[in-house]
Amino acid sequence: MPLKFFKRVAIPSNISTYLSHTLIIVTVATTLLIGGVLIIQQTMFFSKISQQKSKEYVEDQKIYIQEIVKNETEYIRLQNIAFKQRIKSKIKSNVDQAINIAASIHQQYSGKKSDDEIKSLIIATVSSLKFNMEFEEVFISTMDGSGVYYPRKPEFTGKNLRNFKDANGLPVIQEEIKLLKNDSEGFLDYNINSDEALETSPNKKITFVKKFSQYNWYFGSKQYVDDFFPEFRNEIAEKISAVRFRHGGYVFMNDVNGTPIVMDGKVYKGDLNLLSNADDSRKNIFLQELELIKTIPSEGFFYYKWNKINEITLSDKCSYIQLFKEYGWIVGAGFYMDEIENTIKEQQASLRRDQQKSILIIVFILICLLVLEAIIIYHFNKRYKADFDRFFNFFYLSQHSFNKLNISHFYFDEFKKAGEAANEMIVLREEIQDKLIEEQQKAMESDRLKSAFLANMSHEIRTPMNAILGFSELLEDESQDEADKTVFVSLIRKNGDILLNLINDIIDISKIEANLLSVRKRPVLLNKFLNEINEHYTETLALKRDKKIQFRMNTIENQTISILTDESRLRQILDNLIGNAIKFTSNGSVSLDVNIQGDRVHFSITDTGIGIPVEQQASIFERFIQANEGHKMNFGGTGLGLAISKNLIELLGGNIGVESELGKGSKFYFSIQTN
């Protein structure tokens, strides 16, 4: 009897009752088991994670400040390379200038004057060169070691200097000759008063020498690094002092001679010396730094007491330092242990709160689940059976009628969703169809826009590329005669130039986007430059048989006037504007007018072409914009030229404008500074 009762209760014949009993047993047992395991796991996890977090946080802080110091040391190294490179570029430029002048004099007077006269003229010219800083003068010596010209040292003239040593005992002449025996030019770096352990000051000399083979001479120039060093050091100090990190941390930097460079997050400008006139605590800390950098590698962690910014009380601190050996700079950063301990305590408290919260949540969920299970099971059998009967009746009656299910009569979401799916199948299909049509339209529009963009760019690149490939294939045909091959080569070169110009335009636009477009101003003879422009476009238009255009140019009368500008960029601007004028003009003329007013040169390019509508004149200087879509089809082009020209003109200190009337031509005008 008890066994039968147990089977009836545990395994009832009614499916609803069976599901209810099974759900109660499985859910309650699983909930209690999971809850107990989670509570035990939370307790054990807290103890373990609390210890790990303490160690990990300290190690993380050490790694953090180590990375900061290494980053700043690497920054110093890179800036030092650039610093020396600037000096090398300067003295090399001086020597190149002197050798170019000497070569020009030799070429001009060779055969007209004696060698002695030419040498005297070269020495006199080189001695008259002026440079920005002391010791930049160019000296001349023979490859045999005899002095030819040494500024400030007239007694070296004609003297054998092979055994000469400078004030630091360096056989500089021997080193220079040794270098030039293997190379035509090169640099020599001398360390002056260097210490084997540390180079405590930047006493370095850099020399550049270059052969002058016409007379078995070589030219040279030198510069002392410490002439430029104060400015370099200040730049580094300003950068280092600006670094800040968590908990108010900062980077410090000291010289090994005891002079603070960056202290307490500021560039130090006082007279404190950590070895000679600092208090004992500061001195002892600095001595720790000196002892640490004697190790290999010259870096590491050390612990000491230091006051926080705007505080007097000393606190335990851990710092990491690294030596920049070339200048004897000690770069370091640290963190205060009490701040770490406070953070660790806060983390532990947070973990404890999380643990308690997790346990409370587990208990609360367990209770809620038990209550919810009782409610669900109470209603489950009744509602499940009712919903099942409704579906059974619906399927039974559907063979005779097409009535829809009344969704509001169902209790469970699964049955409601099944009923909605049956009743709304047609509606959903229609919605899906509408969405497909809408998405198809969007895709077609997106494809059209993409095709419009790519068509413009790919056409401009593909046209010259197809020409290059096509004529290259024709060149491989041995049946072609030499005259045709010459024409093919010319066409390949022409299309190659077109492709190169397009790529250059794209590169310039990329530089404009990255704010990297620049100009280099140098003296330019204006009339010579304009004559080259005139000759080029006169010849160009003579070859264009499909156009009846005259190129006219009105220039200034002064043949010797010179302006300070970037010749290549100015030529690029004029090529863009004149090229556009020729492109959009079939008959008539293209004119270039140039005049000088005050400190500005004014240019205007006038054509008798198709003109530009007034409403479109404001947008033609934007990238990828031409006057209208028809122009792209009829005349081609990427629309980059005017955008690039506008940016270049602004870099040269000017601005650009346009005047145009549809069907009557256009006038583009701009001005730039003369200096």
Image: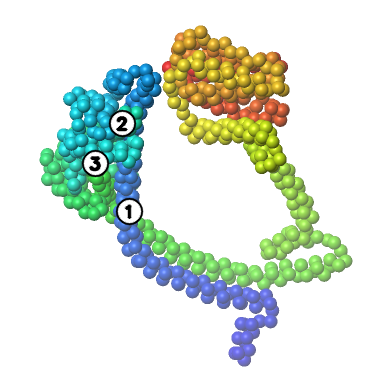
Quadrant in the picture for residue 391: bottom right
Residue located 71% across and 61% down the image: 417
Query: Tag 1's secondary structure?
Result: helix
Residue located 43% across and 19% down the image: 523
Quadrant in the picture for residue 165: top left
Q: How many marks?
A: 3
- Residue lying at the far right of the rendered structure: 400
Query: Tag 2's secondary structure?
Result: loop
The residue carrying pointer 1 sits among few (fewer than 14), some (14 to 19) or many (20 or more) residues within 10 Å by Cα, namely: few
Q: Is residue 168 something that shows in the picture?
A: yes
- Residue lying at the far top of the rendered structure: 557
Q: Whole-Å distance between the Cαs marked 2 and 1?
A: 58 Å
Q: Which residue position is annotated with label 2? A: 216
Q: Nearer the viewer, mark 3 or mark 1?
A: 3
In the rendered structure, find residue 119 and report the number of the disc placed on it: none
Q: Whole-Å distance between the Cαs marked 3 and 2?
A: 38 Å
Query: Tag 3's secondary structure?
Result: loop
Q: Nearer the viewer, mark 2 or mark 1?
A: 2
Q: Nearer the viewer, residue 475 or 11?
A: 475
Q: Which residue position is annotated with label 3? A: 327
Q: Quadrant of the C terminus?
A: top left
Residue 459 position, x and y percent, is: 67, 36
Q: Which residue position is annotated with label 1? A: 63
The residue carrying pointer 3 sits among few (fewer than 14), some (14 to 19) or many (20 or more) residues within 10 Å by Cα, namely: some
Q: Whole-Å distance between the Cαs marked 3 and 1?
A: 25 Å
Residue 553 position, x and y percent, is: 58, 13
Q: Is residue 231 something that shows in the picture?
A: no
Q: Is residue 400 left or right of residue 258?
A: right
Residue 359 position, x and y percent, is: 43, 65
Looking at the picture, which amino acid does disc 1 mark?
Ile
Q: Is residue 560 left or right of residue 237?
A: right
